Image: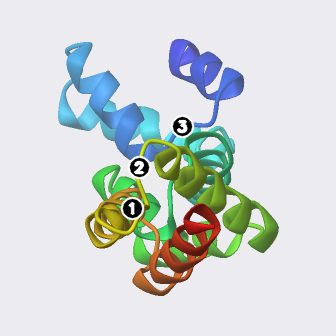
């Protein structure tokens, strides 16, 4: 209990990660539930707080879009309402800046000359989608960087 409380105090943790760590330590289901309940009661674990922190950090520092963040939170077994709350915590300016950073970094490695333009645009579009950004965001940024690099 003390070890998990210390971990939660140092960095934001979700209930699923703590359960996993406790099972790996060899605790039984009952013991795991008891420890998790105590951590929840004492405020060491808060899945909504975790989701907000995870979403903001993944957007700002890792350049993830909302789709990839949603999948990441689902993989950590965070509830749908907590995921929605986490996604709402992303500042629009941070989100736009992250999408532009991802697109600009990929665009530098592509050739937008007449012959290769269509293929490069598709590569850029797919890359932005793979980072979890919505198709409308990917299309807008692809058009922007194609036009910018053509001139």
Q: Is residue 89 above or below residue 20?
A: below
Compared to 59, does 81 lie above or below?
below
Instruction: Indicate left or right for 82 with 34 as reference.
Output: right
Which of pointers 2 and 3 lies earlier in the amino acid sequence?
3
In front of the other: 136 or 26: 136
How far apart marks 2 and 1 lie (CA) works out to 8 Å
**Does label 1 or label 3 sit earlier along the sequence?**
3
Asked if labels 3 and 2 touch by Cβ distance under 8 angstroms, the answer is no
> Residue 13: horizontal and vertical position, in percent?
54, 37
Viewer-closest of 144 and 45:
144
Give SS at disc 1.
helix
Nearest the camera: 146 or 94?
Answer: 146
Image quarter hosting the C terminus = bottom right
Q: Is residue 78 shown to the viewer in this render?
A: no
Label 1 sits on residue? 124
Residue assigned mark 2? 110
Closer to the camera: disc 1 or disc 3? 1
Residue 26 visible in this rendered orientation of the protein: yes
- Give the secondary structure at mark 3: loop
Quarter where residue 5 is shown: top right
Q: Residue at x 33, y 23 (%)?
A: 21
């Amino acid at each position: 209990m003390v070890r998990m409380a210390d971990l939660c105090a140092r960095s934001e943790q979700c209930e699923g990660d703590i359960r996993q760590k406790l099972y790996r330590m060899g605790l039984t289901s009952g013991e795991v539930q008891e420890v998790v309940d105590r951590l929840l009661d004492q405020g060491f674990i808060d899945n909504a707080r975790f989701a907000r922190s995870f979403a903001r950090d993944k957007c700002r520092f890792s350049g993830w879009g909302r789709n990839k963040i949603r999948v990441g939170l689902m993989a950590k077994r965070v509830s749908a309402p907590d995921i929605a709350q986490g996604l709402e915590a992303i500042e629009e300016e941070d989100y736009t800046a992250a999408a532009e950073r991802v697109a600009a970094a990929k665009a530098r490695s592509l050739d937008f000359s007449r012959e290769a333009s269509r293929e490069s645009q598709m590569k850029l579009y797919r890359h932005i989608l793979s980072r979890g950004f919505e198709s409308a965001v990917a299309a807008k940024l692809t058009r922007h960087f194609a036009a910018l690099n053509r001139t």
